[in-house]
Image: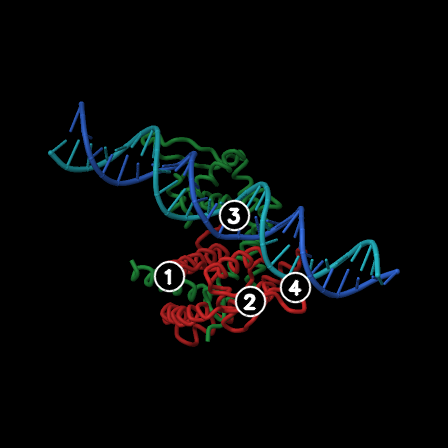
Chain colours: A red, B green, C blue, D cyan
DNA sequence: ATCGTATCGTTTCACATGAAACGAATATGC
DNA sequence: GCATATTCGTTTCATGTGAAACGATACGAT
């Protein structure tokens, strides 16, 4: 019999949504930034400058979402948006000083929060969880491909 | 340094969304039913009749979402919506014959799909994954409570 | 009995979402 | 070189979302 509480797609969805809500509350309240915006910041924190498309590739967000997040961040004075010198279709997105400062304030807090969340698992458990998640994601791609 | 690909809230979100998308594609295409609607069906499959509030309690959906899903299912002729005899605020939701028939077609397919997805893990791994998810969810509640 | 409060489900409202259409810039084929 | 196709990012459009307001019913205290 189908028990929703034991149906993994459902359970995962509930868990993911709760995590997102928890995080969004903090980002939003403390920094006035949404989750999509924060994702853009996080990606630029690793590598700069990037085009919108680069961010799409690295973020699992669609291009409309990225476009809106970038617009908001530019308007907030956190990102600068230049056009690529040799290909004017591409943007060159990078932090403004203000943007970098904000990133450097948020990133440690995000990691610290994750730390507090994950410290209910020991290291082995955490590694297992990540490995199993990755397996599930891989299998999912398989199944998705089968249908197409 | 913060690497989005290693940030669990992000990873979980991506995984959950992909699973949902994969499932929604099937529910929607084959049965003309959305995920919230399917959740209502799944809950009624275990226990009948229920009020909308009962479904809210068992489904992690807010009451607006449940209300809309129920309305759609009633309009599709899958649920019957009576009012409780001794408390007219409450609905008494149950399957119509058509609804039950649909449930009994979908439920095995959902389980079978889950089976195909999860068979990339052995039994021990699956049990671990579920246990770890539950731990993470518990810890999340702790943290959420701390803030309030 | 009556007034205030709580609960149930629907609806409103403001906003987020993704698919598709779109204009601009570039690449490709001939 | 010119026409066509493709790529990039924005915008439009239809839909989904949850918080809050709401009307209706029931409960509780006095």
Question: Could you give the CA–CA distance between mark 1 and mark 2, rounded to whole angstroms?
Answer: 25 Å
Q: Are marks 4 and 1 on the same chain?
A: yes
Question: Residue B119: x, y in percent?
Answer: 56, 63
How far is disc 3 from disc 2 in space, using C-alphas? Answer: 37 Å
SS for tag 1? helix
Within-10-Å neighbours for mark 4: few <14, some 14–19, many 20+? few
Count of labels shown?
Answer: 4
SS for callout 2: strand
Whichever of callouts 1 and 2 sits on the residue coming sooner in the sequence is 1
Relative depth, front residue between C11 and B130? C11
- Residue B35: give its label: 3
| Chain letter belonging to callout 4 | A
Q: Which labelled disc corresponds to residue A88?
A: 4
Local secondary structure at mark 3: helix
**Which residue bears the numbered disc 2?**
A93
Instruction: Please check whether the numbered discs 3 and 1 fall on a single chain.
Output: no
The residue drawn where x is 56% and y is 58% is: A67
Instruction: Choose mark 4 or mark 2, whichever is in front.
Output: 4
The chain holding disc 2 is A
Give the left or right position of residue A88, taking residue D1 as reference.
left
How far is mark 3 from mark 1, CA to CA?
28 Å
| B35 lies above or below B100 | below
Q: Is residue C27 left or right of residue D18?
A: right
Asked whether residue B11 appears in the rendered view, the answer is: no
Which numbered disc, 4 or 2, marks the residue that appears first in the sequence? 4
| Few, some or many residues within 10 Å of mark 2 (<14, 14–19, 20+) | many
Q: Label 3: chain?
A: B
Q: Looking at the picture, how far across and down is residue B110, in whole percent?
A: 55, 51
Q: Looking at the picture, do discs 3 and 2 lie on one chain?
A: no
For label 1, the residue is: A26
């Amino acid at each position: 019999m189908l028990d929703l509480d034991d149906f993994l797609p459902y359970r995962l969805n509930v868990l993911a949504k709760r995590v997102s809500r928890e995080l969004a509350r903090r980002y939003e309240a403390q920094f006035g930034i949404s989750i999509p915006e924060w994702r853009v910041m996080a990606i630029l924190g690793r590598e700069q400058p990037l085009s919108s498309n680069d961010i799409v590739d690295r973020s699992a967000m669609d291009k409309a979402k990225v476009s809106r997040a970038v617009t908001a961040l530019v308007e907030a004075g956190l990102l600068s948006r230049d056009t690529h010198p040799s290909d004017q279709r591409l943007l060159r997105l990078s932090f403004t000083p203000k943007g970098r400062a904000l990133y450097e304030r948020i990133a440690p807090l995000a990691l610290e929060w994750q730390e507090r969340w994950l410290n209910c698992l020991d290291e082995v458990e955490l590694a297992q969880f990540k490995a199993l998640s990755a397996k599930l994601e891989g299998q999912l791609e398989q199944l998705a491909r089968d249908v197409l």
